[in-house]
Image (cartoon, helix red, strand yellow):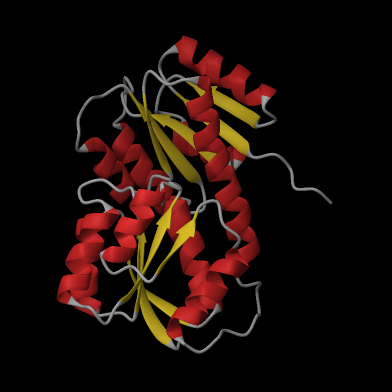
Amino acid sequence: MPALPPKVLIVDDAAAVRSMLRGLLSEEGFRVVADLASGSGVLANVERFEPDIVCLDYNLPDADGLELLRQIHAAHPTVAVVMVTGTVDADLESAAAEAGAAGFIRKPFSPDKILKELGQVAHTRRLLAAAQQPAGAEAVPPRAKAVIADDSATMRQLLKAILERVGVAVVGEASDGKIAVDLVTRHRPEIVCLDLDMPVMGGLEALQTIHAAYPAAKIMMVTGNANRDAIVQAGKAGARGYILKPFRPEKVGEAIVRLLG
């Protein structure tokens, strides 16, 4: 039986944005369960409709979008929240990633941009559902430790599920490269998975810092950017391989097993 299209809850105080998103997403096969103009009913509607994705405006008339994001992520960690904002604050993307965002989009955005972002989030959620251990499945004994870094909470959940299936215990999760460096320093894992594009400190800078301080770590880059120069640069800086998004979980698991030898 084919999987149902993802359910989306839209939260934005601009009627034009809500209307545009509802029409665009409905045309692309998403199921828009509700669109809200304020933050007051968000948590109740998440409880009621159980959406897969929430498109959440940061600037709401009666609520702090970032605090709403934290509340949704704490109560419903499997719901993917994509923050949408016209705010130019350079630190907001990092704060959203740390609070549990699955994606981040700045206004004004094109239809292609929003569809690509939500499509990637939906695809990652499907992979996560397939990669997670079924109830009652026997756990693989840990054979190594890992730190994973990605500014998408959904991607971190997916990587954690894949690593645990092949016996790698995830001892730290980071939403940016700086946090990743701190976690590696603290835990000294055998495996590090670094997203290339992250706020605060990008994956390449984090790779260089980690490799210089802890060369024994086997670092795998994770990226949606197929730019050959970036991949070559990462290899020269000490990366042991790269994973190109979107990826197949079984291939990632095989790559990690090969890394461990």
In this view, the residue farthest toward the right is: 1
Residue 174 visible in the current orientation: no
- State whether residue 34 is above or below residue 188: above
Closest to the observer: 123 or 243?
A: 243
Query: Is residue 259 toward the left or the right of residue 196 in the image?
Result: right
Closest to the observer: 213 or 83?
A: 213
Q: Where is residue 149 in the image (x, y as percent from the top left)?
A: 34, 60
Q: Which residue is drawn at 67% across and 31% down?
A: 31
Q: Residue at x 31, y 54 (%)?
A: 175
- State whether residue 143 is above or below residue 46: below
Residue 107 visible in the current orientation: yes
Q: Can you tell which quarter of the image residue 173 is in?
A: bottom left
Closest to the observer: 132 or 184?
A: 184
Q: Position of residue 10 (x, y in %)?
A: 51, 27
Q: Residue at x 33, y 64 (%)?
A: 235
Q: How many numbered discs?
A: 0
- State whether residue 109 is above or below residue 241: above
- State whether residue 136 is above or below residue 98: below
Query: Is residue 1 toward the left or the right of residue 217 in the image?
Result: right
Q: Position of residue 130 (x, y in %)?
A: 65, 62
Q: Where is residue 117 in the image (x, y as percent from the top left)?
A: 49, 36
